[in-house]
Image (cartoon, grey):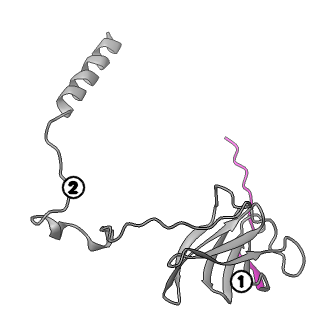
Amino acid sequence: MSIKYITAIAVLFLVFSCGTDSFDLKMSNGNWKDFNEDVVLLEDKVIELPLDDKTGFWHYSMAVDEVSEVDMLSFLNPLNNSLYIYDLENSVLSSKTSFDSEGPNGTGSLTLAFHKYINPDTVLVFNIWQGVMYFTNVKGTVTKKTTVDRLQRRRSYS
């Protein structure tokens, strides 16, 4: 009886919860004040970027930053330990920085890392595996590094 009872309630709930009224989310002359201007799509265009044969189809760290009033797309490519920076206004590769894995300018493997492109002289790369923040530039020179977090694994026994 309980399964039939639950099924009947579920069917009744489904039937009575469905309606023909719809909520119109489109902006019109009558409701434009209800919309936040920050979420309105202002421009729609396709940007074609030149990619090389080392660019994979996934990236853990990708960002668009305004640098000197130009929108720049940057991403870390874990396949070749590089940072690609594209000028979005001109659809060109502005710079490609290959980071050493070891040595004085080494950032380790960037298979799991995040970055922040500030300007050509300042690029922050955080290697999660190491817990180290690298201060670099677009030439790949590490100017400073600091341990941000010592990753400690806690064991939980249930």
Badge 2 is on which residue? Answer: 25
Badge 1 is on which residue? Answer: 138
- Please state if 4 lies on the left or on the right of 127 as rendered: left
- Residue 105 location in percent, x, y? 84, 80
Determine if the magenta segment contains residue 144: yes
> SS class of the residue under badge 2?
loop
Contact (CB < 8 A) between labels 1 and 2? no
Residue situated in front as seen by the camera: 74 or 113: 74
Counting other residues with Cα less than 10 Å from the Cα at mark 1, is it few (<14), some (14-19), or many (20 or more)? Answer: many
The amino acid sitting under disc 1 is Val
The residue depicted at 55 percent of the width and 74 percent of the height is 91
- Up-down relation of residue 5 to residue 75 (above or below): above
Looking at the rendering, the stretch of residues picked out in magenta corresponds to: 143-158
Instruction: Using the rendered view, name the quadrant where residue 22 is placed.
Output: top left
- Residue 52 location in percent, x, y? 70, 64
User: Whole-Å distance between the Cαs marked 1 and 2?
Assistant: 44 Å
Residue situated in front as seen by the camera: 44 or 10: 44
